[in-house]
Image: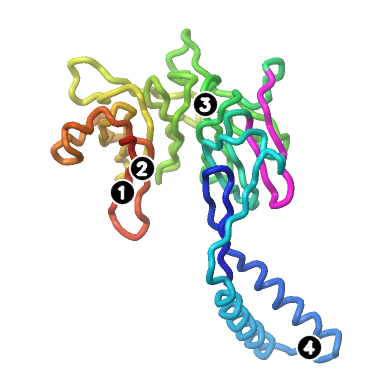
């Protein structure tokens, strides 16, 4: 099994090319059939496994050095500043940039842009976050025009935006992060509040900082979302705090600086929170 590294701008993605090995195995078997030497039953299965293992070891040994492929505007990328990357369940790579959303099939880019005259177009120029939920739906977070759900059949975007007359709308049009928890609840972080999506009503439940309420969010600038356990969300803030939110009680508990980082770091924003799948650790990045 060979290992390749692909770089787009300053963001790096990892690609495992096992499919190339499988393709070579299938070509070998087709050759056997054309020579009337087609193996049958268990023999076929053994030859497939052995050939795949031998070829995988060989190909891995030939790739001792990591190589980088660069995709730029010259290749069709709409803009060189990449804010977010996603691979969907069909294998396409998606890149959110400062100017538009890009879908890459391994050869060509298809660019989606914002059109103020088209309600079904991309919800803004700058795409800050992308998320693939349990159903395979892509969610797009923009800097100025809220959240959108992508329909892969029509290639349209259904927008969810802030409405000052509707308290169940998105709390802000500046979407910073998107996350789906183990209960399949979609969470949307914005520059002004945390949002829980009610899929039945297609509405949002908002969470805000409340003065003199120690159980509310410590800040309205949400910058990262993860999950500690079912029903307990871990939230990072642009002002540097980190806190847990309990779904049942609706109470938020800040993880104080003494337990997290020295007090001098409180003004440094949290950028990303990732839970380690092998244990209970969390990987947290921030500005320094």
Residue of label 4:
38
> Element at badge 2?
strand
| Residue 189, label in figure | none
107 or 252: which is nearer to us? Answer: 107
Q: Residue furthest left?
A: 258
Q: Give the magenta-colored segment's residue range.
A: 100-115
How many residues crowd mark 3 within 10 Å: few (<14), some (14–19), many (20+)?
few
215 or 27: which is nearer to us? Answer: 27
Marks 1 and 4 sit apart, C-alpha to C-alpha, by: 51 Å
Residue depicted at 21% across the width and 26% down the height: 215
How many residues crowd mark 2 within 10 Å: few (<14), some (14–19), many (20+)?
many
Residue of label 1:
282
Q: Point out the tag, 1 or 3, that comes first from the N-terminus.
A: 3
Residue of label 2:
273
Q: Are marks 1 and 3 in contact (CB under 8 Å)?
A: no
Residue of label 3:
202
Residue depicted at 56% across the width and 58% down the height: 5
Q: Point out the tag, 2 or 3, that comes first from the N-terminus.
A: 3
How many residues crowd mark 1 within 10 Å: few (<14), some (14–19), many (20+)?
some
> Element at badge 3?
loop
Marks 4 and 2 sit apart, C-alpha to C-alpha, by: 52 Å
Answer with the quarter of the image where residue 186 lies.
Answer: top left
């Amino acid at each position: 099994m060979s290992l390749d590294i692909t770089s787009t701008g300053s963001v790096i993605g990892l690609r495992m090319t096992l499919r190339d090995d499988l393709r070579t195995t299938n070509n070998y078997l087709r050759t056997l059939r054309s020579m009337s030497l087609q193996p049958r039953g268990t023999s076929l299965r053994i030859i497939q496994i052995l050939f795949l293992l031998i070829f995988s070891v060989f190909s891995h040994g030939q790739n001792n050095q990591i190589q980088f492929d660069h995709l730029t505007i010259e290749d069709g990328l709409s803009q060189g500043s990449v804010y977010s990357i996603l691979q969907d369940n069909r294998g396409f790579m998606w890149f959110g940039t400062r100017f538009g959303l890009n879908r890459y099939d391994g050869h060509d880019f298809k660019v989606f842009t914002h059109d103020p005259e088209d309600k079904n177009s991309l919800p803004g120029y700058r795409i800050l976050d992308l998320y693939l939920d349990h159903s395979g739906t892509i969610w797009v977070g923009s800097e100025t025009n809220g959240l959108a759900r992508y329909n892969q059949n029509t290639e349209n975007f259904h927008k969810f935006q802030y409405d000052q007359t509707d308290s169940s709308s998105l709390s802000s049009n500046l979407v910073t992060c998107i996350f789906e928890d183990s209960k399949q609840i979609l969470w949307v972080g914005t520059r002004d509040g945390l949002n829980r999506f009610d899929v039945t009503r297609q509405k949002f439940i908002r969470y805000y900082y409340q003065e003199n309420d120690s159980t509310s969010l410590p800040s309205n600038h949400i910058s990262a979302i993860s999950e500690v356990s079912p029903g307990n969300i871990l939230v990072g803030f642009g002002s540097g705090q980190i806190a847990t939110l309990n779904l049942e009680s609706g109470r938020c508990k800040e993880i104080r600086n003494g337990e997290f980082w020295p007090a001098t770091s409180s003004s440094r924003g949290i950028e990303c929170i990732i839970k380690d799948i092998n244990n209970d650790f969390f990987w947290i990045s921030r500005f320094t």
